[in-house]
Image (cartoon, rainbow, N blue to C red):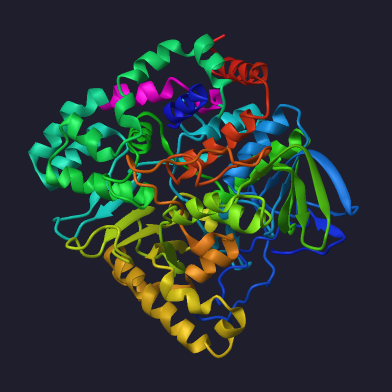
Amino acid sequence: MACIDILKESIDAGREGPAQAHVVAPRRRAMQALSTSHTRHGAMHRPGQDARMRVGSSWKPIFTTRIRATQEETDAVVVGAGLGGLCAAAMLAQHGHRVLVLESHTQPGGAAHAFDFGDGFHYEAGPSFYAGMRDTEGLNPIAAVLALVGEELDVVEYEPLGTYHFPSRSRPMRRFGKVELLIEEIGELGGEEGARQLKEALPKLRELAMALRGIPVAALRPDIGVAEIMLKRYMPALAKLGKWARFLNGPTSVLLDHLGLKDPFLRQYIDLECFLLSGLKAEGTVAAEWASVFGESDLTPVEFPHGGSAGLVNTLVRGIEKHGGEVRLRSHVEELIVENNEAKGVRLRGGHIVHAREAVISNATMWDTYYHLVPKGALPASFLDEVARAPATPSFMHLHLGIAADGLEGLTGHHAVVIDESRDFTAPRNVCMISIASTWDPSLAPPGHHVIHAYTMELWDDWEEFQDKKYRLGEGKAKYEALKRERSSVLYEALARVIPDIHERVKKEMIGSPITHAFFLRRYKGTYGPGFVAGKQSFPGPTTPIKKLLRAGDSCLPGIGVPAVAGSGVIAANSLVSNADIFSSLDKLERRRGRN
């Protein structure tokens, strides 16, 4: 997806743990969840309450406590165990590098972690839409990473991938992955003109998808070394991609115009899908991102990992450990060690120092990396001003529910509900996303029940006064709880369009605010990610102004979702290895596909 940017740039050129004990401690399954989380028909849960990590289909601690010296050394340090950081660590580990992942939380996964409180409900905290996790020819780098570390992911395939609820339509729209079925759906709900336009554009859309597939993310690196890889292996693929190059980094809306996709309902549907991907509509979403997701859903199965997101995270961690790497939890990095504009390692809360011979990779957002991790004075004020001007998408309101499932046979897992079509999709609380993970994996809820995660965009500014924990849990508690209840009511409104008697079914309820999102995921203003507008701004990639400091995560490559995050980790790791190593990985993937 970021191939054109990378080539152009290249060629143009915890929660805290004890100070003395850095814990790989029992992985405890808490979001530790929500700043003050309520359990309907049960007791109030507060952060710090223990929970357990789901490993496959069993429950067990898989880390041991180790006492560490005050200093240690490794090849590479990864700050944060989100999917981007884990993919970077896995790639480096399989190349034989000693890699240490330091995670502040009690469990790995970042936004992709899950949590429970021992009552049989297993809550998803972040992404739930996955595709192409086993297809090493596809555009989701997760598949290549898992193949290279020798891990298999157990998944459930399903269709349709989602249901979109537009109030003006006679019924909800089923968003099928297979485009022939999607065309029929467009015709039934929006008229034959939209169906005709999509059908006529389909050959070109598939051509574009195949062109994007022609250059795997595992072949990319963010420096001039990528030129050798392209020249030796991917010139035919570059030629196929070349005819689309002028569209890929621009807005999706320009690509749609070029393809003749102008029908109002068709564009409304694509605007909604772009918003779900990037937080922006088609006019602001990078075309390569939308084209990749649209093409992949047509070419590869839509999947959900058994065990939820934790199933994917645990599989990545196993791959890292299998190759000698380590993921260390409850290890809060206080700051990076920078000398002469070069990252030398990290200092943890409590004073423990880890020296990095090769690099430090930050899996924090661009704002958290440069404002909080990099020492003051290490970056010029002009650069920090530029970071400050980078647009951030809003945060979220979250609603986690455990409900009775009787009479809900045939319920599907993904829903996007538009509250008011006269308002912009990007308006706060106007589009609500619903994930019912137990429809794919029933083990995520007790028998006869479902587990639900509903969420919607919410502005940070209305919550800033509650950042102070003492105020939030003391004098301001009643105001905070009332605002949470008020702002989450739209999520119940959206759920009622899917499950009309939702209120009567609720057994467990937890409400999370932007404060919750920022606190537990350590994200600047609880943001979903950067809001770079296609054609006007560009994602900065994994490199930084500080030597040996790289970044991975959702503010590196076009797109905020899983493929872009995973890809950023792969590309960051590739910058630390030789092209011979990259060719070796590519050969391994080819052999796995049975081509050699």
Q: Quadrant of residue 504?
A: bottom left
**Above or below, comparing residue 414 to residue 151 in the picture:** below
Residue in front for this viewpoint, 535 or 321: 535
Q: Which residues are magenta?
A: 205-220
Where residue 344 sits: x, y (%)?
A: 76, 43
Q: Would residue 208 be found to the left or right of residue 77 on screen? A: left
Dominant secondary structure, magenta:
helix
Instruction: Tell me the quadrant of the picture where the N terminus can be found.
Output: top left
Q: Would residue 372 be found to the left or right of residue 428 on screen? A: right
| Residue 210 colored in magenta in the image | yes
Image point (67%, 36%), residue name: 90
Where residue 280 sits: x, y (%)?
A: 33, 51
**Above or below, comparing residue 525 to residue 304 in the picture:** below
Residue in front for this viewpoint, 229 or 408: 229
Q: Would residue 235 be found to the left or right of residue 23 on screen? A: left
Residue in front for this viewpoint, 25 or 410: 25
Q: Taking the image as drawn, is residue 29 in sight?
A: yes
Image point (54%, 23%), residue name: 219
**Farthest bottom residue?**
475
| Residue 197 colored in magenta in the image | no
Image point (65%, 60%), residue name: 29
